Amino acid sequence: MSDKQVSNTNAEKPANAQQRYEITKDDLPLHCPMEGMTLWNSHPRVYIPMDDGRGKCPYCGAEYVLQD
């Protein structure tokens, strides 16, 4: 592999790419952007309260729904 090639094996997901995310209890406590998302082009990390299994990011408006 040359110096200019980049391996995608450890690629992160783009931050705030979706408007709705389904999460599990393993993702709690929930924050946006989530683990594994790129941070350099996103808003600051904010923790999201999950009222009645739903939460919404005040920065990007992404909605999170807790799956059983």
Image (cartoon, grey):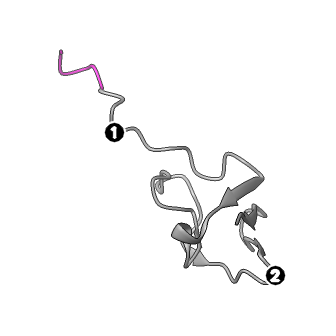
Q: Residue at x 45, y 53 (%)?
A: 36
Q: Position of residue 66 (x, y in %)?
A: 71, 68
Q: Along the line of sight, which residue is nearer the eye, 26 or 7?
A: 26
Quadrant holding the C terminus: bottom right
- Circle 1 SS class: loop
Give yes or no for residue 35 being in the magenta stretch. no
Residue 5 placement (x, y as % from top left): 27, 19
Foreground residue, 24 or 54? 24
* Vertical position of residue 44 compared to residue 9: above or below: below
Q: Which residue is mark 1?
A: 10
Q: Amino acid at mark 2?
A: Asp
Q: Secondary structure at mark 2?
A: loop
- On the image, the x and y values in percent for residue 29 come to 55, 79
Q: With respect to residue 31, does 14 lie above or below?
A: above
The main secondary structure of the magenta stretch is loop
Residue shown at the point (33%, 39%) measured from the top left: 10
Label 1: how many Cα within 10 Å (few below 14, some 14–19, many 20+): few
Q: Residue most toward the left?
A: 2
Judge by depth and name the residue closer to the eye, 54 or 41: 54
- Tag of residue 52: 2
Residue 6, x across and y down, in percent = 30, 26
Q: Are marks 1 and 2 in contact (CB under 8 Å)?
A: no
Taking 58 as reference, is 36 left or right? left
Please report the bounds of the magenta region as a residue range.
Answer: 1-6
Q: How far is mark 1 from mark 2, CA to CA?
A: 34 Å
User: Tag on residue 28?
Assistant: none
**Can you tell which quarter of the image residue 22 is in?**
bottom right
